[in-house]
Each structure stands twice: as C-alpha cells, then as structure tokens.
Amino acid sequence: MAAWTPHVTVATVVEKDGRYLFVEEHSEGFIHTVFNQPAGHVECGESLTQAAIRETIEETGHHVEIDALLGIYTYTPPMFPDRTYYRFCFLAHVTQVESNPQLDTDIVAAVWMTPDELKESARARSPLVLKAVEDAMKGHRYPLSLIYEHPFSPSLTSHLDA
C-alpha cells in the first residue's frame, strides 16, 4: 500500500433560483464524466478563500464573492484508500460571468442543476458533492472569521529552493 497522503481542497457552493453551479468533468478513476462543485487543491501561498475563488473562475468562468464557510468535510475514496481529502466548502454568489471562458482541460462544462437533477444523474464525483448542497439547503453557514490563516511569507520556504 502506498503512503497515506492528505490533500487540502476547497469547493464553492453557489445557488441561484434553486439551482446550483456544478462542473461536469473528467476525473481519475471514473469511466464517465462526473459532477462536482467548482473545486480543487490549495496552491502554495494561497489562502483557502483565494483558492476557492480561483478554482471557481478556472472551472466555470464565474467570478464569485465568498460569503461564508459552509463546512469542513473529509473523504477517503474507496478506490484510493491512501488519500484523504480535507475539503473546505464555501458559500458564494456570482459577481461576474466571463463571456468566453477558457476552462481547465478536464472540465466539460459549467452547469446549473437542482439537487434532484444531481441525484437523478447518479454522477456526483463523491458523496461530499450532495452533502454540501444538502447542508446549504439546511442553512448551514459559519463566519469566515472561524478560519485563521497566518500570513504566508515566501522567505519561510526559501530553504526549499536550496
């Protein structure tokens, strides 16, 4: 068995008129496309909210403003027991939509669906996709001040380049 690897990820839950913003994407381990919130890994030097905003733009062409923390979720996929994803989900609203966005290569399209349409598709990337929508519908929301992120200092990582 490979070494256990934690992954810090973010996801953005955006609702408008009872529909939620998802991405249809190709994903490792699946033979068909799957649906996910705009989501991805946090990059070096990024805050969690910066990563959520960036991923949403890259995957959907929608610019968003983060409103609240929806929740913190963990998931170890059965097909990859050596990986655990720590997923910070945020609630956001759209501020601008690009007219001709260049989406990430694995993204087929940005789509708006109801929770029932997501369930009927049976193609959620993980159980966390529907769980986040259900939590949003229940009114879960936490202030962003719940997260403290110490300011990043590039000088702290300079020893990595040596």
Image: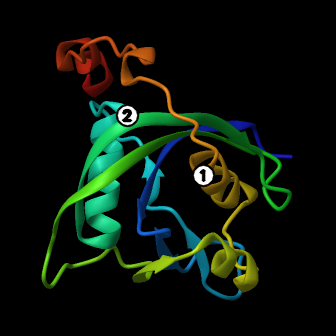
Q: Position of residue 117 (x, y in %)?
A: 65, 81
Q: Nearer the viewer, mark 1 or mark 2?
A: 1
Q: Residues within 10 Å of mark 1 (few under 14, many from 20)?
A: few
Within the image, what quadrant is residue 158 found in? top left
**Residue at 33%, 36% in the rendered image:** 49
Residue picked out by circle 2? 48
The residue closer to the viewer here, 48 or 17, is 17
Q: Position of residue 56 (x, y in %)?
A: 33, 59
Q: Are marks 1 and 2 in contact (CB under 8 Å)?
A: no
Within the image, what quadrant is residue 123 found in? bottom right
Asked which secondary structure carries label 1, the reply is helix
Residue picked out by circle 1? 137
The residue closer to the viewer here, 58 or 93, is 93
Name which of mark 1 and mark 2 comes first in the sequence: 2
Asked which secondary structure carries label 2, the reply is helix
Type of amino acid at the residue the image marks with label 2: Leu
Type of amino acid at the residue the image marks with label 1: Met
Q: Position of residue 19 (x, y in %)?
A: 48, 71
Q: Residues within 10 Å of mark 2 (few under 14, many from 20)?
A: many
The residue closer to the viewer here, 32 or 161, is 32
Q: Position of residue 148 (x, y in %)?
A: 39, 13
Q: Is 84 situated left or right of 139 in this image?
A: right
**Residue at 28%, 19% in the rendered image:** 157
**Residue at 68%, 76% in the rendered image:** 116
What is the number of callouts on the image? 2
Q: Quadrant of the C terminus?
A: top left
Within the image, what quadrant is residue 82 found in? top right
